[in-house]
Image (cartoon, rainbow, N blue to C red):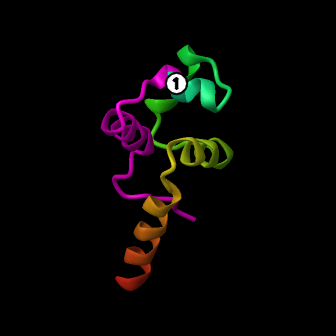
Amino acid sequence: MATDTGEIHIGQRIQQSLKDKKLSIAWLAEKVNCDRSNFYKILKCKDIHSRLLYQISIALEEDFFAVYSQKIAEKIAST
């Protein structure tokens, strides 16, 4: 089964959210209990583990899962 998520790069979206909220990657890494240097690597990834994405969503008060939900709805509607 294909898992094509289109052009979603969730790491970039998280970085943009941090920038918009004037928060640092170090701040977020601490909030989700992750090493800062490792967190930089995580944000370069297109995909992030759901548990970590949940923690990031809570910390930034933004539903990053909604990005995928919207893509799913669009995919279903186009079939």
User: Quarter-wise, where is residue 17 in the image?
Assistant: top left
Residue 73 or 5: which is nearer the viewer?
A: 73
The answer to whether residue 11 is magenta is yes
Location of residue 59 with respect to 3 vertically, above or below? above
Residue 57 x, y percent position in the rendering:
55, 48
User: Quarter-wise, where is residue 22 in the image?
Assistant: top left
User: Can the viewer see residue 43?
Assistant: yes
The answer to whether residue 69 is magenta is no
Q: Residue at x 62, y 49 (%)?
A: 54
**Residue 7 horizontal side relative to residue 47, left or right:** left
Location of residue 29 with respect to 60 vertically, above or below? above
Residue 3 or 9: which is nearer the viewer?
A: 9
Q: Which residues are magenta?
A: 1-26
User: Can the viewer see residue 79?
Assistant: no
Location of residue 70 with respect to 58 vertically, above or below? below
Location of residue 73 with respect to 59 vertically, above or below? below
**Residue 13 horizontal side relative to residue 52, left or right:** left
User: Quarter-wise, where is residue 44 in the image?
Assistant: top left
Numbered circles on residues, count:
1
Residue 76 x, y percent position in the rendering:
44, 81
Residue type at tag 1: Trp
**Disc 1 crowd, CA 10 A, few/some/many (<14, 14-19, 20+):** few
The N terminus lies in quadrant: bottom right
As helix, strand or loop, the secondary structure at mark 1 comes to: helix
Residue 79 or 35: which is nearer the viewer?
A: 35
Q: Which residue is mark 1?
A: 27
Q: Residue at x 57, y 19 (%)?
A: 38
The C terminus lies in quadrant: bottom left
Q: Residue at x 52, y 58 (%)?
A: 65
Residue 23 x, y percent position in the rendering:
41, 29
Residue 61 x, y percent position in the rendering:
51, 49
